Amino acid sequence: MENKETLKAKLFERINNDTSYSKDDIDLINKAYNFAEEKHKGMTRLSGDEYITHPISVALILSELNTDALTIACALIHEVMNNGDTYFNEIEETFDIQTAKIVDSISKINKLELPDDSESSAMYLRKVLIGLAEDVRVLYIKLADRLHNMRTIWAVDPEKQKKKANETLSVLVPIAHRLGINSIKSELENLCLKYLKPDVYKDIEDKLNDSKENLKECLEEMKEEISDILEENNVKFEIKGRVKSIYSIYNKLNNGKKFEDIYDILALRIFLNKESDCYLAVGLIHSKFRPVPKRFKDYIANPKENMYQSLHTTVFGVDGKFYEIQLRTYEMDEIAEKGLASHWSYKEKGAKKIQNIMEQKLEMFRTIIESNDEEDFSQTMQNEYLEDSIYVFTPKGDVVELPKGSTPIDFAYRIHSDVGDKTVGAIVNDNIVPLAYELKDNDIVRIKTGSEASPKKDWLNFVKTSQARNKIRSFFSKKDKMTYIEKGKELIYKELRRRSVSQSDFFTEENINNVLKDLKLNDLDDLYLSIGSTRYTAGYVVNLVTEDKGTVQDALIEKIRSKSNNYKPNSDSDIIVDGEDGIAVSLAKCCKPIHGEPIIGYITKNQGITIHRIDCHNIQDKTDRLIPVSWNEASNKVYRTDLVIEVDNIGNYLLDIVSTGALLKVYVDAVETHTDDVHTIYDITVKVNNYEELNNYMKELRKLPFIINVSKKN
C-alpha cells in the first residue's frame, strides 16, 4: 500500500497540473488536507495504514473524475465527524455552511448499512441515500469512499467482505450506473464479484490468463491494422486495447453463453477529435473488416439516458476473432468514464448549472421513491435500474430507452398513456408481432390503436415497466370501482323492494346524511361502493334507517360476553378479543396503536371491532360499546404509527431524523413538512415492531440538539 506522502504527492500533482482548478481552489484543498491530517493524527486503519490515507485516496479518485474543488475538499474531511472528534459547528466555522452540510450528510450516510441481504433492506437504503442526498456531491463522495474501501476490504473478515460486497452491488452500483460513472461502476462490479463469488471470479480470471499472451498479441496486431487504415486516410486518432472485464464476462456466462461465444472479450477504443471523424473511421474499418450483423450501435446520434455517446461495432478481425470497437471523441470519453462530473471542469458552464443537470439525472430515482409500495419499489428497482437497457425507435426515428425484456405495451405507455390504453396491435421492423413480444435493440416499433380499445388484464403478466403496470392497474381499479358502485346500487334497491320500503322514503336527505355520517363515508357513491365490495351488507345499511341502530352491536357484545373465558386465540391475529375468535378486527386510524400499548376495543356499526389506544380522545365519551382486548404475544407484525417532531427552523434535519431511525431499525415510511418563521414540524409515519422500539427511537431523537419536541400523534 502507498503511504501518506506518496498519496499526497499524487493528489496535489494532479490538481496543480489541472488548469481547471484556480489558486483559490488549490488553497481550499490544501486547507482541507491540513485539517484532516490534524484530526486523524495517530489513527490507523485495519490494514495498518495511517487513517489519513483513506480520505486522500477518496479525494484522489474524485480528482480523476474532474470533480470540483469543493467535492475534493469535502472528501478529504469526510471522516472527521465519525472518526475525528469534530462537530458541525467547527467545520462551518473553519470552512462554510455548505461544506459542513456535505460532510454532515456523508457522515450520517456512512453510519447506515444493510441489516441483511434482503431486497427490501437494499430498497430502504437506496431510499435514504438518494432521497435525502440534498447535494449530489454527497453521492460522489460516497461512491469514491466505497471504491477505496472495496480496494482494501481484504483487511476485514470474510463475512463482512460479503456483506459489504452485496450492499455495494445492490445499492451503490446502480447509482454509479445512472450517474454515468463507468470507471467506478466497472471496478466496483469486479471487486464485488471477487468477494461474493471468489471461485467464479478465479475461474474466469484463469481462463483469461491462460490465453493472455495470445490475446495480447492479437490486440496489438489488430491495433496496427486499424492504425494503418486511419493513417492512410489522414485521420488523427488514438487507440487503446483491453480485455473485457471479469464481471461483464460473468454476466454473459450467467445468461447462458459459453465462454467461447462471447464476442467482445477483445475490445479496442478509438479516440478522435471530431464527431464526423467517428463515422469516417467506422466506415474505413468496415471496408476492411466484415462487421458482425446487428452489432452496430450508434449512441452518438441516439445518446443513452445518462448522456453516454459512442459508436459500437463488432468485426471479424485478426486470427478470426471477434473484436468490439468503440469510437468516440475525447469529450465523449470524459462523459462515459466520469459521468456528469466531467462537466465540472468546464468552468464557463457554471457549477450551479452542472449541479442542476446532475439533479435531473437523480429525478428518475426520486419518482420511484415516492411510492409507499415496498414490493412495487423493489421490483421496479430490480427490473428497471439494475438490469440492462435497450434502445428502440419510433417510426419517426425518435429513440426510446426501455429496460431489457420490455414489450410493445411498455413502449406504447412510454409514448403516452392514451396510446397504451388504446393499443390493439404492434408492428416491429415491418412485421406484425404479439403484444408480449420481447423487444430488441434497434427495433423500429409501430403501435396500432383502436378508438374503442381498452387495456387487458393479461397484459400485467408480461409488461416490464412500472409505468405500464401502474397505468393498467389504475384503469382496472377505476373500472372495478364503477362495477362495485352499480352492484351496490342494485343490491340496496333489491333490499328495499324485499322489505316493501319505498325509495323516496329511504333516500331522504336526512336519512342519507345520517348513514354517511355513521359509516364515515363521503357520498352516495361511496355507500354503493361499500355495499358492492361487501364491506357492508345492504340489509345492514337499511337497518340503520328502519330499525334500532344498537341491535347489531348489542348482539355482538352479548355474544362476546357469553363465551367461556377458557379461550385460546387465533395465533394469526395480533389482537385477542376475550371469548371470541374470527371477528373482524382493525386498528384505529386516529391513534394507530402499536404492540405493547394499552388498548381497548370498540364495537362499530359494521359488526367489527376497532382497536384504540386506551387514552384515545375518540373513545373518551364511549362506555357502552367498549370491550376488553389484549395483544397476542405470539404476533410478530410491523405497525405503522405517526410522530410529530418539532425542530428549530435553522436547517433541514430530515436526514438526521431518518438516519437515527435506520440505525435502530425504525424506518420512516412517509413525511409531511410544515414550516413557519420559527419552527419546522415533521409529521412522520414510521414502521416499528412494538412500542418499546418506538419509545427508544423517540428517546434518541430527543437527544438531538435541534429537536424541540417529539410526541406520538393522537
Image (cartoon, rainbow, N blue to C red):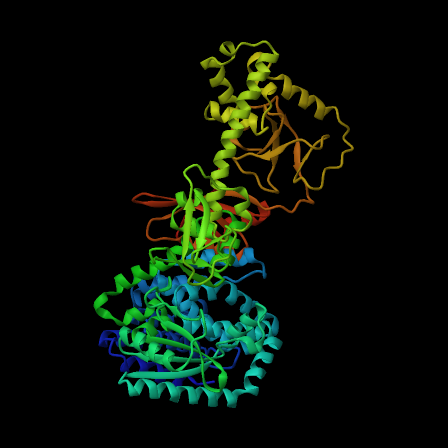
Quarter where residue 14 is shown = bottom left
Q: Locate residue 543 relative to residue 481 in the image: left or right.
A: right
The residue closer to the viewer here, 231 or 84, is: 231
Q: Position of residue 508 (x, y in %)?
A: 47, 12
Residue drawn at x 50%, y 71% as measured from the top left? 189
Q: Position of residue 19 (x, y in %)?
A: 24, 78
How many discs appear? 0
Q: Position of residue 260 (x, y in %)?
A: 56, 78
Q: Position of residue 701 (x, y in %)?
A: 47, 51
The residue closer to the viewer here, 679 or 193, is: 193
Q: Locate residue 235 relative to residue 263 in the image: left or right.
A: left
Whether residue 665 appears in this view of the structure is yes
Whether residue 672 appears in this view of the structure is no
Residue drawn at x 58%, y 17% as measured from the top left? 494
Q: Locate residue 578 relative to residue 365 in the image: left or right.
A: right
Q: Locate residue 630 relative to residue 563 in the image: left or right.
A: left
The residue closer to the viewer here, 268 or 69, is: 268
User: Outermost residue toward the left?
Assistant: 348
Residue drawn at x 44%, y 71% as measured from the top left? 295
Is residue 477 positioned above or below 649 on the image? above
